[in-house]
Image (cartoon, coloured by chain):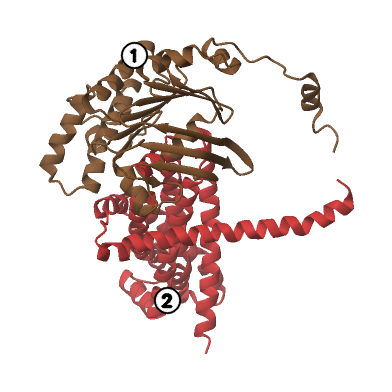
Chain colours: A red, B brown
Amino acid sequence: MSAAEKITALPDRVGAATLNGLAYVGGLARLTGESAYVAFVGPFRGQRLRLQRALHQAMAVGVGAIPIVSLITFFVGLIMALQSAYELRRLGAIQFVADAVAISIIRELGPLITAIIVIGRSGSAFAAEIGTMKVTEEVDALETMALRPVAFLVAPKFLAMLVMVPCLTVWADFMGVMGGCLFGVTGASFTVMSYLRATRDALVVSDIVTGLVKSALFGVVITAVGCQEGFATGAGAEEVGHSTTTAVVRSIFLVIAVDLLFTALFYLTNRG
Amino acid sequence: MGTNKPADEGPVISVVDLRVSYGEREVLHGISFDVLRGETLVILGGSGSGKSTLLRTLMGLEKPSGGEVWIKGVNIARASDRELDEIRKKMGVSFQGGALFGSMTVGENVALPLAEHTHLEDSTIEIMVRIKLEQVGLASFEDYMPAELSGGMKKRAAVARALAMDPDLLLFDEPSAGLDPIIAAGIDELILDLKKAYAMSIVVVTHELASAFLIADRLLLIDRGNIIAIGNKEEIKACTNPRVRQFLDRVPEPQVEDELNYLQMLTRGSKG
């Protein structure tokens, strides 16, 4: 291929990549829309909602993640306290360490770290589960039994994630603050009560609400990407591994993109 | 549904000039045949002949790019989801690897279509599951997980699930693939028993000649996306078409069909 051909081929490639990207996001939106229909509209039209399966998923996604979420966010809270104390001490403002930890954890790191842990534990598991079912023709079997794979497989996960990711985020926020508290009590002149009081004074309700809104969105994104990658699995066992990897990488990217989008949106709407 | 053929007479399946493509590549090049009520039709063909695609199209898993597929008076190429569901509820499918749901016990697998599509009480469903499992020789295996079953037992369990809704049409994908001759003979026996007991219409896709000639009322040979022979056992055995003879006499493909093509294949991609 000559240099001129390479240059003229570039717009083609950019166009094709853009279309593929849009089609991908469109696919995610469709999967989410169908799941939302099954979860919230279907039951009022006499279709069965598989609450048992949703509950099962909620246990795996939410309750199973509590130990690791606790440990990691506790550490992150402690790290944030140490890092900010480093600067604050020079300014003689070490009592603001509680504010720094509270704001960074509750507005940003709690929801984000929780989302990333959930991607690693559950987003990958969704892709692997549905991918394996695709390879072993179980997804086809569902269809030939007149059962909708989305209603049967995706909707329960969607419902579980929509509830459990915000719940985990609340817990992660709490554990992050406790991590900061450990430093506050040992490294600065706080007591547990005074640290928690300082944390409460540093926050407004909207800090917590925006974090929870974001985390619910993260849950939706993780479910949609995990399931879409699962359904896109080709033939053969090695394809499952490939889908799982793709699901994790794309989920992390999309979660951060959504995070940026909504943080910017909250910033712009609250400026006045 | 004025244009539909009457449902109670005539062939169960009527395929007219069916074409199926994957992207640009056409796999079935306009094939037509009927499956009569109560007969067992065996579709024979080599790897890549299009026989699996044909079966998937009959299940409604592949959309034809042209032609018609009438099942019990409904053209499934154009049917709505609801119409397709009604057809599928009365159609049992046994997949190559069984496609049992790995997260459910054998009993739950068989019970699933009943629990989803009927309003039967749990105790009734339990009894029906036992009856179906007993029919395929798997009585007392209902609490096993699919992973604990051997290949032949998985296929039997899959047949039990396919029978759950008392279908009048059964589709088998490669019933003896991956099984030793004794177990495979057992599956053949099971198909013959079902035929006797229920007078169902059965379509079997296979490449096993012995099993095909044992269970078939009529055979259909498919090669490179075209039907090369259709008829009863005697007609097929007497057929003189060279491709049919090659398949029945198990003559291997000539290694290099065209030396020029072969050379082109080897040198392809070496320039630009």
Give residue A17's quadrant in the image.
Answer: bottom right
Residue to which mark 2 is pinned: A207
Q: Nearer the viewer, residue A98 or B215?
A: B215
Q: CA distance from mark 2 to mark 1?
A: 68 Å
List x then y, in percent, for residue B33.
46, 32
Q: Nearer the viewer, residue B19 or B259?
A: B19
Residue to which mark 1 is pinned: B185
Q: Can residue B18 be seen from the camera position used here?
A: yes
Task: Tell me the mark number nearer the camera, choosing from 2 and 1.
Answer: 1
Q: Helix, strand or loop at disc 2?
A: helix
**Residue that appears at 49% across and 11% down:** B238
**Residue that appears at 49% across and 45% down:** B63
Q: Nearer the viewer, residue A157 or A199?
A: A157
The disc placed on residue B19 is none
| Quadrant where the image shows the C terminus of chain B | top right
Considering only vertical position in the picture, is A208 above or below A216?
below
Residue reaching furthest to the left? B123
Considering only vertical position in the picture, is B17 above or below B244?
below
The amino acid on which the numbered mark 1 sits, given as a three-letter code, is Ala
